[in-house]
Amino acid sequence: MSGRGVRSIRGMNDILPGDASAWQTLERVCRETFAAYGYQPIRLPLLERTELFTRAVGEVTDIVEKEMYTFEDRGGDSVSLRPEGTAGCVRAGIEHGLLHNQVQRFWYAGPMFRYERPQKGRYRQFHQFGVEAYGLIGPDVDAEQIALCARLWRRLGLTGLRLEINSLGTVEERQDYRRELMAYFSDRVDELDEDSRRRLERNPMRILDSKNPEMRPVIAAAPAFEDSLGPESREHFDGLRARLDAMGIDYTVNPRLVRGLDYYTRTVFEWLTDQLGAQDAVCSGGRYDGLVDQLGGSPTPAVGFALGVERLVALIQDQGTAPDEVAPHAYLVHRGGDAGRDAMLLAETLRDALPHLRLHTHAGGGSFKSQFKRADRSGAALALVMGEEEAAQGVVQIKHLRVDQETEQVGRDELPDRLGRYLAGPGGNDEHKEQR
Ligand code: ATP
Ligand code: MG
């Protein structure tokens, strides 16, 4: 690239066709799985009033203190690129009267923006899929969302993901815990880093979320939340655990799991992997019963999670489990006489008959040899060959480019059936027939 070219912004990635297959697999499996649990799509703006996030995420959080892309628009309003999806979802739910005394299940997807230090698995523009359920108070829906996640991993063929859960109690119970933590950390100020000292007064629970390894010992010895849980929160947590046990979903209780946002109550959970280095969380969420009220709606219980698309795509690619959803199934090679015209007609007929067929028709002429080279490079499994002779006889040759199998000759009329059977068969890589 020339020195004068304009480069992309650090931490904001182009997602190129080479990565498209894993992205599309993840996106499709998410959409299908969310629908299987009754969640409906909601599409929300990328830009919101800054106040929404300071009120929802919390002022003393990494996100609001140092990660938001905030600026004044031309009308003088302070706006921010969304750092997460829940605040906007609640805002929209209140604004459109969707939450009052109703049960709603939504999912959203799209880019989020955080000014973080870019590294593997951590970017400034990254993508999430998120799920939110409103109006349901019991631990059944918490457990169901976790089961939904487990099903996602199964459908994606991913292994090695572990689940951690914790309970943060109610807002009131947190006040007690906060006092306890404040007392504990105040006695150990010299062991705290600068960030933690700053947090001590306003939000000592944030200290538990510190990513500084030097803070680990002092955090490990801090009082656990358990002791501050009231009977109802305890019952909720026990209810969650009983359901996870009944469904055979493994988990560990991590009493230090507090999550990076202020709005959580009771259940919090995180799915982790050992295969991505330091950026080990692929999906996290929990219950936020106070947030709707806090943003001006009538009190409504809520629970949700968000998954990090880039991290899951990396896992899908490392584990090599996704079907190819991008490479053409077939590359149509043609040359001589009426073959070019006939090939184009044939391609249209095939697309009519097989809407899922990914067919690349050669364009630009050239020898058979050069066309086969392109066919090979396209990643297609099959070459459909129409030369002068085939055109005259109304037939097509099917050449297998990836497996050692004899070339077949098929009449043009039979070709849609033959390809249909191929798509449904083991070599077809047909994404519509995968495991459940
Ligand atoms: P982390 O602890 O890794 O900073 P987080 O607790 O800030 O994550 P959430 O706000 O809960 O993350 O977002 C849900 C998911 O989004 C995370 O589990 C992660 O997979 C992904 N995610 C969060 N921040 C980033 C980022 N900067 N780049 C890529 N993915 C991210
Ligand atoms: Mg973070």
Image (spheres, helix red, strand yellow):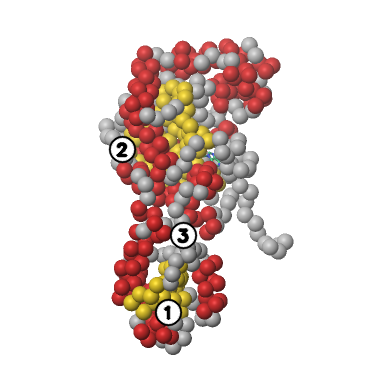
Expressed as whole percent of the image width and height from the top left, the position of residue 119 reads: 63, 42
Using the image as rendered, state which of residue 1 and residue 314 is in the foreground.
Answer: 314
Cα–Cα span, label 2 and label 1: 54 Å
User: Which residue, given by chain and number where applicable, does mark 1 sit on?
Assistant: 386
Residue 57 vertical position relative to residue 109 in the rendered view, above or below:
above
Ligand 1 closer than 8 Å to the CB at disc 3?
Answer: no
Where residue 297 appears, as percent x and y from the top left, is 35, 32
**Residue at the disc numbered 2:** 104
Apparent side of residue 216 relative to residue 321 in the rendered image (left or right) = right
Q: Amino acid at mark 3?
A: Val
Residue type, label 2? Gln
* Picture quadrant where residue 103 is located: top left
Q: Which residue is mark 3?
A: 326
Residue 1 sits above or below residue 391 on the image: above
Name the foreground residue: 53 vs 308.
308
Label 3 secondary element: loop
Question: The disc labelled 1 sits on which kind of residue?
Answer: Met
Residue at coordinates 53% horizontally, 22% vertically from top-left?
256
Residue 70 showing in the rendered view: no
